[in-house]
Image: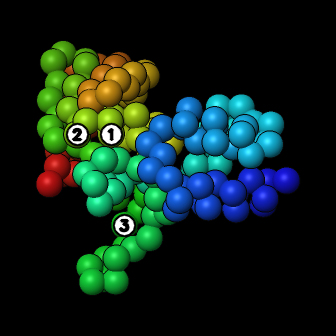
Amino acid sequence: MKKARHKKILSLISEYNIDRQEVLLEYLQKEGFKVTQATVSRDIKELNLVKMVSSNGEYKYAQNTIVEDTKATFTRFDYIFSESIKSVDYSMNTIVIKCHTAMAQAACEVFDSLFWDGVVGTLAGENTILVIMRTEEQAHNLCEKLKQYIK
């Protein structure tokens, strides 16, 4: 069942400009798959899907493939995070990460998939991620690391 669902997800994202998990969930349910949002979220992670800008300028899910011209190998985090964020700053023990519109949740998901020393928790909106740290020093150190991903 999982293989069939993964195959259908890849088919759906190639046919439609699907930009949110909820939309993908609706398409899958219309196709007869009995899935939850949590299942769709895991599928996106397992299929290594990323949000890319489509030809009409809107974001959509796509398979994460390496562009041959760049001859670079990016980890999922490196790729998604560097394409998503615009700025990083902190105040006391809180880091604010500004992202391109509709990219904060994708960036936060890959951020949360890694271990970061001192992170208490994260919260993502449409274009902003809040990262709560245990100490101001840890916030400063992580902020400096994350600034390396700004293009």
Residue 136 occupies quadrant: top left
Vertical side of 135 occupied by 11: above or below: below
Distance from the alpha carbon under mark 1 to that under mark 2: 6 Å
Kindly report which numbered mark, 3 or 1, lies closer to the viewer in this rendering. Answer: 1
Query: What's the residue at 71%, 40% (across, down)?
Result: 30
- Where does label 2 land, which residue? 100
Residue 27 occupies which quadrant of the picture? top right
* Disc 2 packing (10 Å; few <14; some 14–19; many ≥20): some
Q: Residue at x 60, y 60 (%)?
A: 10
Q: Residue at x 28, y 54 (%)?
A: 56
Percent x, y of residue 86: 16, 41
Closer to the camera, 23 or 102?
A: 23
The residue identified by callout 1 is: 103
Whether pointer 1 and pointer 2 mark residues with C-beta atoms closer than 8 Å, the reply is: yes
Image side of residue 70 versus residue 51, left or right = left
Disc on the earlier residue, 3 or 2: 3
Q: What amino acid type should be assigned to the residue bearing mark 3?
A: Phe
Residue 80 is at least partly visible in this image = no
Amino acid type indicated by mark 1: Met
Give whichever of discs 3 and 1 has the lower sequence position: 3
Q: Residue at x 48, y 46 (%)?
A: 18
Element under disc 3 = loop
- On screen, 73 above or below 87? below
Residue 17 - label: none
Label 3, on which residue?
A: 74
Quarter placement of the C terminus: bottom left
Asked which secondary structure carries label 2, the reply is loop
Q: CA distance from mark 3 to mark 2?
A: 20 Å
Q: Is residue 93 left or right of residue 68?
A: left
Tell me whether circle 3 and circle 1 mark residues in contact (CB < 8 Å). no
Inspect the image, locate mark 2, and give the three-letter code of the amino acid beneath it: His
